[in-house]
Amino acid sequence: MKEAFLHHLWNCRKFDGAASTSKLQTVCGKKLQIIKTGMHNQLAGPDFFNAQVGIDDQLWAGNVEFRIKSSDWYLHNHQQDPAYENVILHVVWEYDCTVFDKVDAQIPTLILTDKVNDELLNNYQHLLESKIYNFINCESRFKEVPDFLSA
């Protein structure tokens, strides 16, 4: 699993409950609604800026951070980094610990593991494991080009 795939799932709302007002829950059992996914950040800091989510009917606006494992939050010392003070939701593939910010407030966490369509996940895994993936569609046929044309 790659974090970029989690970004794609979030940005395109490609997981169960993403478009619903009642199907998603945080790890603490609070009702979660995604209102705006935010803007994908390609630089340092949280992965999505200016997202909006509803948690138990309270509207939150801020940043969303993604990790494969929830414990990666601590591995990267996000709890000490001021850039992560406005994280309103932690989205993970694997939940292995509760995450707190620098003032010891628990950050709401969404686990995606059981929310991704099996077909989508299988296609993604096949792409990662595939030995036939080519950057250019006809790349595998380059060997057929005569040497005098490729020099």
Image: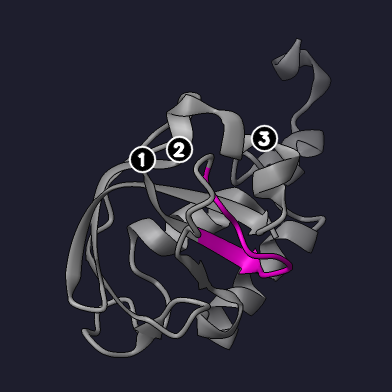
Q: Does residue 69 show up magenta in the picture?
A: no
Q: Main secondary structure of the magenta part?
A: loop
CA neighbours of label 3 inside 10 A, class few (<14), some (14 to 19), many (20+): few
Residue 122, image x, y percentages: 65, 78
Location of mark 3 (residue): 77
Residue 120 horizontal side relative to residue 13, left or right:
right
- Closest to the camera, between mark 2 and mark 1, is 1
Residue denoted by label 1:
86
* Secondary structure under the numbered disc 2 in the rendered image: loop
| Disc 3 element | loop
The amino acid on which the numbered mark 1 sits, given as a three-letter code, is Asn
Quarter of image, res 52: bottom left
Span shown in magenta: 91-101
Position of residue 8 measured from the top left corner of the image (x, y, whole percent): 45, 56
Which residue is labeled 2 in the image?
A: 46
Query: Which of 78/64 is in front?
Result: 78
Between circles 2 and 3, the one closer to the viewer is: 3
- Residue at the image point whose x is 70% and y is 49% from the top: 72
What's the amino acid at mark 2?
A: Pro
User: Within 10 Å of the Cα at label 1, are there few (<14), some (14-19), or many (20+) other Cα atoms?
Assistant: some
Residue positioned most to the front: 103
Rendered-image quadrant of the N terminus: bottom right
- At 42% from the left and 37% from the top, the residue drawn is 85
Q: Nearer the viewer, residue 44 or 103?
A: 103
Contact check, label 2 and label 1, Cβ < 8 Å:
yes
On screen, 3 above or below 106?
A: above
Instruction: Name the residue located 50 percent from the left edge and 25 percent from the top edge.
Output: 44
Q: What whole-number distance in Å separates the C-alpha atoms at marks 2 and 1?
A: 9 Å
**Residue 101 locus on image (x, y percent):** 52, 46
User: What's the residue at 54%, 50% (across, down)?
Assistant: 104
